[in-house]
Image (spheres, rainbow, N blue to C red):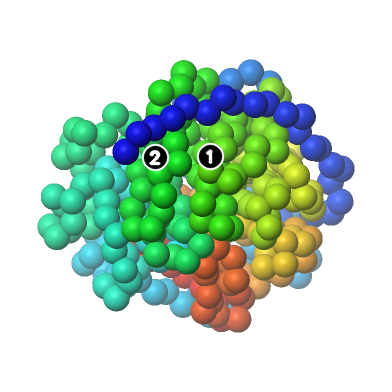
């Protein structure tokens, strides 16, 4: 596997006016985020506890929350930091599966695969930096893992198309996303930097803005000609044909935003908080959140939406909350 560098291009960020806030979550606890220094320039964001809720659209506990995933004994250690489809990955590069029937294509800590579903980082000295995320190919027959140093590891039918591990990064890599064709991917830095490989197009970054908090997620438009970046304070940055529908930037939050997903038609998106709070924008329909549920605040790591990135079969809400113990919850 030969890695080739990519010259980073920094474009002008497309900042649209905030159209409307569809829902505001009420967060219940504040959790410290894992920090890494971020580069120069960013948008003012939100911090603090509490937020006023829009009547009828609150991120309140829902009446029917359905859990799926490994048994309680298999979920004893909560350590997953990223997911793709029904796969989860921890910092040591171990890949867990939502169900034993899900395909497995490989991982960076094979010595631990049959021993349990968590591998301490000390067992994987071959990794130069912890794994921070993963992305699946469009046919769901392979996936990539990405390290904080920009290293990329390909499994199944996922092609290796380059990495940022040989570049001097201004901030660690925090997320990645594949292209709709499965022949490219983007890596995202905590400072909003974007690295494009294969048929992924570079459409701009946030690395030239004074950000209040780190960027920690990316969502991609259905045709791959646009993408959104989301920051821990709920700020949203839109590029290419990805439209801006609103954000939580500048509003007080009691917990950090950990991820986002577009709707199936791309005319809206969801933001999800570490405590399971949910924010819906555009045509995204709020059907409930994990606030007040049995999921401990701080353990939600993302959201998956029906018809997006290979996800299907959610309950009436059309979305799942992905949890650090390798399980998921949906709202019925």
At a point 41% along the width and 23% down the height, the residue shown is: 166
Task: Looking at the picture, tell me which residue is in the foreground, 180 or 326.
Answer: 180
| Dot placed on the residue nearer the N-terminal end, 2 or 1 | 2
User: Circle 2 is placed at which residue position?
Assistant: 152
Instruction: Measuring from the top left, give residue 190's x and y in whole percent.
Output: 54, 32
In this rendering, is residue 150 above or below 89? above
Q: Is residue 248 found left or right of 118 in the rendered image?
A: right
User: Circle 1 is placed at which residue position?
Assistant: 197
Q: Is residue 135 found left or right of 121 in the rendered image?
A: right
Instruction: Measuring from the top left, give residue 69's x and y in whole percent.
Output: 35, 71
Task: Looking at the picture, tell me which residue is in the foreground, 291 or 268.
Answer: 268
At a point 59% along the width and 26% down the height, the residue shown is: 8
Instruction: Measuring from the top left, give residue 118's x and y in whole percent.
Output: 23, 52
Q: Give the number of the mark in front: 2 or 1.
A: 1
Q: Is residue 281 found left or right of 173 in the rendered image?
A: right
Residue 62 seen in the current view: no
> Is mark 2 in CB contact (under 8 Å) with mark 1?
yes
């Amino acid at each position: 596997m030969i890695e080739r560098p990519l010259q980073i291009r920094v474009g002008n960020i497309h900042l649209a006016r905030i159209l409307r806030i569809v829902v505001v979550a009420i967060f219940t606890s504040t959790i410290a985020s894992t920090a890494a220094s971020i580069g120069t320039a960013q948008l003012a964001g939100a911090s603090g506890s509490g937020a006023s809720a829009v009547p009828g659209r609150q991120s309140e506990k829902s009446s029917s929350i359905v859990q799926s995933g490994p048994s309680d004994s298999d979920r004893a250690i909560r350590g997953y930091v990223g997911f793709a489809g029904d796969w989860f990955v921890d910092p040591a590069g171990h890949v867990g599966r939502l169900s034993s029937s899900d395909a497995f294509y490989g991982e960076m800590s094979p010595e631990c695969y049959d021993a349990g579903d968590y591998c301490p980082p000390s067992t994987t000295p071959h990794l130069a930096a912890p794994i921070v995320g993963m992305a699946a190919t469009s046919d769901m027959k392979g996936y990539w893992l990405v390290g904080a140093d920009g290293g990329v590891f390909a499994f199944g039918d996922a092609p290796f198309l380059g990495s940022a591990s040989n570049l001097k990064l201004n901030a660690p890599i925090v997320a990645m996303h594949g292209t709709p064709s499965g022949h490219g991917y983007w890596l995202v830095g905590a400072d909003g930097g974007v690295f494009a490989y294969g048929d992924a197009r570079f459409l701009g970054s946030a690395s030239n803005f004074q950000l209040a908090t780190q960027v920690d997620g990316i969502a991609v438009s259905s045709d791959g000609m646009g993408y959104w970046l989301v920051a821990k304070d709920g700020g949203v940055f839109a590029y290419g044909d990805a439209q801006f529908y609103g954000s939580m930037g500048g509003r007080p939050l009691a917990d950090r935003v950990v991820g986002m997903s577009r709707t199936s038609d791309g005319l809206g998106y969801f933001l999800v908080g570490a405590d399971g709070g949910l924010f819906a924008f555009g045509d995204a329909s709020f059907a409930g959140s994990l606030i007040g549920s049995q999921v401990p605040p701080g353990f939600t790591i993302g959201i998956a939406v029906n018809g997006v990135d290979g996800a299907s079969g959610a309950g009436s809400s059309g979305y799942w909350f992905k949890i650090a113990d390798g399980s998921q919850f949906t709202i019925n």
